[in-house]
Image (cartoon, rainbow, N blue to C red):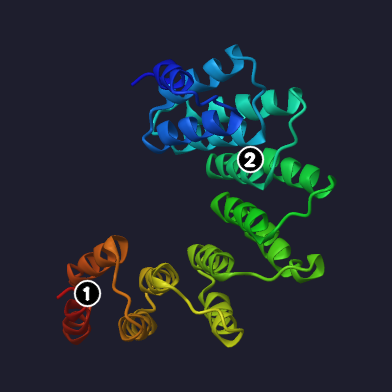
C-alpha cells in the first residue's frame, strides 16, 4: 500500500496523521529497505503541511546508511545538511550515523572535524561517539591517534566499553603489536568487561596470523570454554594454517579439533 493511501485511509477513519505517525510509517519502510517509499512518506508529510523533526531526518539518514544501494552515504550526508539548514538540531543518533559513514569510508579528517564540532556544542559526546572515531582511526592506520583518544577517555569522564576495547585490541593486532593487545585484553577483563565472541575471534586471529600459534591456541581454548565459537574468518585462518606444509603435525592436529 502506498504512503498516501495509508494516510487517506487513516483520515477516512477519523484518525488525523501527525509527525509521529509519518515517522512511524517511514521507519517501517526503512526497516524493509524500501527507501523510495520512505521518501514518499517524507514528501507526503511536507505536502500536508507538517514540518519534519529531528526524528524524521534521523530515520531517513539511518535508512540510507543501512540501505545496500551505493547512493546511501551521499543521501545520508545531504539529508544531514538539510536538517541543519532547516534549523533542526542533530541528535546523538544523527551524529553517530554520519560519523560511522565517514569513518568506514576513510574520510577521517571530516569525521574528526565533526567530532570537534560536537565537542564544541552543548552536547556531550558519549562513549559510542568516541568509539566510532577510534574505530575510524584504526581502519585508517592512524593507530597513534586512536591510542591517544582511547587513553584520554577518562579525562572526558568516560570509560571504554566492550566494543571500545575490542576495536582497540583489533587495531593493535592488525599492526602486529600483540604484547600491547594482550595487555589491553587482560586490562579489559580485570576491569570487569567480559570479552564477547567478537573480541575473542579478533584477538585469536591476530595471534594466529602473526605466527604466535601457541598463544592463539590458548585463546581458542579459552573462547570455547566461555561458550563462544570460531567465526567464519577465524575458521578460514585455521583452514589456511592446516594447509601449510611447514606447520608441525602435532599443532595441525590440535587446530583441526577446533573445526570439528
Q: Residue 94 has which mark? A: 2
Most foreground residue, 65 or 221: 65
In this view, the residue farthest toward the top is 47
**The N terminus - image quarter:** top left
- Residue in the picture at 38% in, 82% down: 219
Q: Nearer the viewer, mark 2 or mark 1?
A: 2
User: Horizontally, is 227 left or right of 130 in the view?
Assistant: left
Residue count near mark 1 (Cα–Cα under 10 Å), binned few <14, some 14–19, many ≥20: few
Residue count near mark 2 (Cα–Cα under 10 Å), binned few <14, some 14–19, many ≥20: many
**Picture coordinates of residue 196, whole percent (x, y):** 43, 73
**The C terminus - image quarter:** bottom left
Most foreground residue, 237 or 26: 26
Most foreground residue, 54 or 246: 54
User: Horizontally, is 253 left or right of 171 in the view?
Assistant: left
Q: Residue 246 has which mark? A: 1
User: Horizontally, is 175 left or right of 37 in the view?
Assistant: right
Q: Residue 183 has which mark? A: none
Q: Quadrant of residue 57?
A: top right
- Give the SS element for disc 1: loop
**Picture coordinates of residue 182, whole percent (x, y):** 52, 80
- Residue in the picture at 48% in, 19% down: 11
- Give the SS element for disc 2: helix
**Picture coordinates of residue 168, whole percent (x, y):** 57, 66
Amino acid at each position: 500500500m502506498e504512503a498516501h493511501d495509508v494516510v487517506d485511509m487513516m483520515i477516512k477513519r477519523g484518525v488525523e496523521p501527525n509527525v509521529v505517525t509519518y515517522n512511524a510509517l517511514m521507519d517501517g519502510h526503512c526497516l524493509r529497505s524500501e527507501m523510495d517509499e520512505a521518501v514518499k512518506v517524507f514528501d507526503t508529510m511536507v505536502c500536508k503541511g507538517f514540518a519534519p523533526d529531528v526524528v524524521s531526518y534521523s530515520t531517513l539518514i539511518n535508512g540510507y546508511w543501512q540501505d545496500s544501494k551505493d547512493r546511501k552515504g551521499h543521501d545520508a550526508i545531504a539529508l544531514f545538511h538539510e536538517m541543519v539548514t532547516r534549523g533542526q538540531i542533530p541528535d546523538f543518533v544523527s551524529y553517530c550515523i554520519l560519523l560511522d559513514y565517514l569513518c568506514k569510508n576513510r574520510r577521517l579528517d571530516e569525521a574528526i572535524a565533526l567530532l570537534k564540532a560536537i565537542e564544541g556544542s552543548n552536547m556531550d559526546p558519549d562513549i559510542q561517539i568516541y568509539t566510532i572515531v577510534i574505530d575510524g582511526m584504526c581502519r585508517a592506520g592512524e593507530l597513534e591517534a586512536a591510542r591517544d583518544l582511547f587513553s584520554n577517555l577518562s579525562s572526558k569522564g568516560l570509560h571504554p566499553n566492550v566494543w571500545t576495547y575490542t576495536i582497540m585490541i583489533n587495531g593493535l593486532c592488525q599492526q602486529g603489536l600483540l604484547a600491547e593487545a594482550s595487555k589491553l585484553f587482560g586490562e579489559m577483563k580485570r576491569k570487569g568487561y567480559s570479552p564477547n565472541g567478537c573480541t575473542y575471534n579478533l584477538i585469536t586471529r591476530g595471534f594466529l596470523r602473526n605466527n604466535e600459534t601457541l598463544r592463539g591456541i590458548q585463546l581458542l581454548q579459552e573462547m570455547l570454554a566461555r561458550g563462544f565459537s570460531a567465526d567464519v574468518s577465524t575458521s578460514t585462518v585455521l583452514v589456511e594454517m592446516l594447509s601449510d606444509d611447514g606447520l608441525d603435525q602435532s599443532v595441525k592436529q590440535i587446530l583441526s579439533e577446533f573445526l570439528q
